[in-house]
Amino acid sequence: MRSSVVARPDQQEIRPTTVRSPGAAPAHSAPSGADVAITYLNDKAKPHVEPLARLEAPIHAVGRSRARPGRAGVRTYFGDRGELDFLVHSIAFSTKDALGGRVTDVPREGFLTTMEISCWSFIRMAHLAEPLIKRGGAFFTMTYHGSQFVVENYNIMGVAKAALESAVRYVATELGPKGIRVHAISPALSRPAPPPAFLSLIRS
């Protein structure tokens, strides 16, 4: 088993989903040589992923507010014979009535929606992606330190992230023997200067 939960206390936001798939149509090549396909949830998320079009990667909408990835969608992105080397799951959602109030007062529907999109969608994506991992790989998902500590106004999302981190450990245990590493990370801006290759990419 290879799993980790890496938290950064200064994370400010969660970015849309990014999926990378070397060697699989209809993705396109990034500067590093990897083939990349990018997905987003809805029109509200689209402006955040459109700048990634500089990688000449296809960008796909994946559906409505509830994240329910299916096998047909996986075939659309990677082809019937596609292979996947790693996947980044980066989606979270909660209804206003669930997120805006106390955890003690969360309504059932709001709780189920929060858990379905923020946690279960990762489990489902791991299930669908597993057959595409032919030579070992890695799954990543986004977490936040509000899963381990009480953060003001984070509320039910902290509960969902705690569940997500637990799912990471179980999925890592199950898929580890196949060489699939599973990680929950909490990225944030870093103060050290970025490498020259990254600077040249964002300036191009």
Image: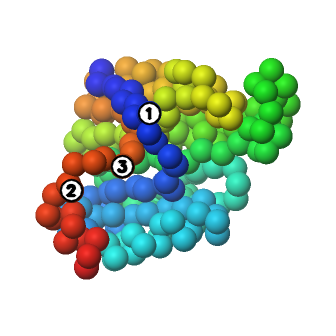
- Total number of numbered labels? 3
As drawn, which residue projects farthest toward the left?
196
Residue 106 at x, y = what percent?
Answer: 81, 29
Q: Of helix, strand and loop, which one carries label 1?
A: loop
Task: Place residue 82 in its image quadrant.
Answer: bottom left
Residue 4 at x, y = what percent?
Answer: 34, 26
As drawn, which residue projects farthest toward the front?
191
The residue identified by callout 2 is 194
Residue at 40% in and 55% down? 19
Q: Position of 98 compared to 130: left or right? A: right
Mark 2 burial class by Cα count in 10 Å: few <14, some 14-19, many 20+: few
Mark 1–mark 2 distance (CA, rounded to whole Å): 20 Å
Q: Of helix, strand and loop, which one carries label 3?
A: loop
Mark 1 burial class by Cα count in 10 Å: few <14, some 14-19, many 20+: few
- Label 1 amino acid? Pro
Q: Is 108 placed above or below 194 here?
A: above
Can the viewer see residue 36? yes
Residue at 22% in and 42% down? 135
Q: Position of 60 compared to 30: left or right? A: right
Residue at 21% in and 67% down? 199
Q: Is 67 placed above or below 63 here?
A: above
- Label 3 amino acid? Leu
Can the viewer see residue 141? no
Mark 1–mark 3 distance (CA, rounded to whole Å): 11 Å
The residue identified by callout 1 is 9
Dot label at residue 189:
3
Q: Position of 112 compared to 118: left or right? A: right
Residue at 30% in and 47% down? 190
Q: Is 45 placed above or below 53 here?
A: above
Residue 184 or residue 123, whichever sits in front:
184
